[in-house]
Image (cartoon, rainbow, N blue to C red):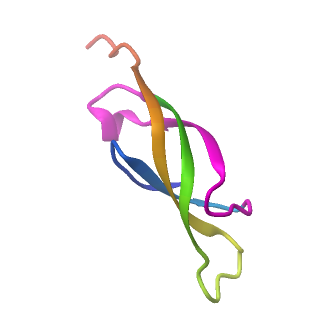
């Protein structure tokens, strides 16, 4: 689950074990409510720069900060009104 995103990177929660320095291939979808009435698809490559393990986190999810090295934004066509 994405918690924050910018043109430089993304902060997300994941159940997989990642380490700082790991390379990533990401595909994300911004829903119409967040992207101006159309879905926005983002394809990116990047690198994990920080992993935050939360103490007492029973479900073992971790928070990950990743920097984009390259990204592409693809907007879907807006639905007819």
Residue 37 shown left or right of residue 23 in the figure: left
Q: In the rendered view, does 50 fall on the left or right side of 55?
A: left
Q: Give the magenta part as a residue range.
A: 16-41
Along the line of sight, the residue nearer the viewer: 72 or 22 = 22
Farthest residue in the front direction? 21
Quarter of the figure with residue 7 = top left
Q: Residue at x 30, y 10 (%)?
A: 80
At a point 56% along the width and 49% down the height, the residue shown is 47
* In the depicted structure, whether residue 59 falls above or below residue 28: below
Horizontal side of residue 42 vs 77, given as left or right? right
Question: Closest to the observer: 46 or 74?
Answer: 46
Taking the magenta stretch, the answer to whether it contains residue 28 is: yes
Quadrant occupied by the N terminus: bottom right
Residue 43: x, y in percent? 52, 30
What residue is rendered at 46% in x and 33% in y?
Answer: 70
Whether 13 is drawn above or below 57: the answer is above
- The answer to which quarter of the image holds residue 61 is bottom right
Residue 56 horizontal/vertical position (percent): 64, 89
- Quarter holding the C terminus is top left
In this rendering, position of residue 45 left or right of residue 9: right
- At x 74%, y 63%, the residue is 17
Q: Residue 23's x, y, as percent?
A: 64, 46
State how many labels appear. 0
71 vs 20: above or below: above
Whether residue 33 is in magenta: the answer is: yes
Q: Is residue 24 above or below residue 13?
A: above
């Amino acid at each position: 689950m994405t918690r924050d995103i910018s043109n430089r990177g993304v902060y997300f929660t994941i159940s997989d074990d990642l380490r700082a320095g790991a390379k990533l291939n990401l595909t994300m979808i911004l829903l119409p409510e967040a992207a101006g009435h159309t879905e926005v698809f983002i394809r990116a490559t990047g690198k994990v720069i920080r992993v935050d393990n939360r103490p007492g986190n029973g479900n073992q999810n971790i928070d990950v900060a990743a920097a984009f090295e390259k990204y592409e934004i693809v907007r879907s066509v807006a639905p007819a009104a």
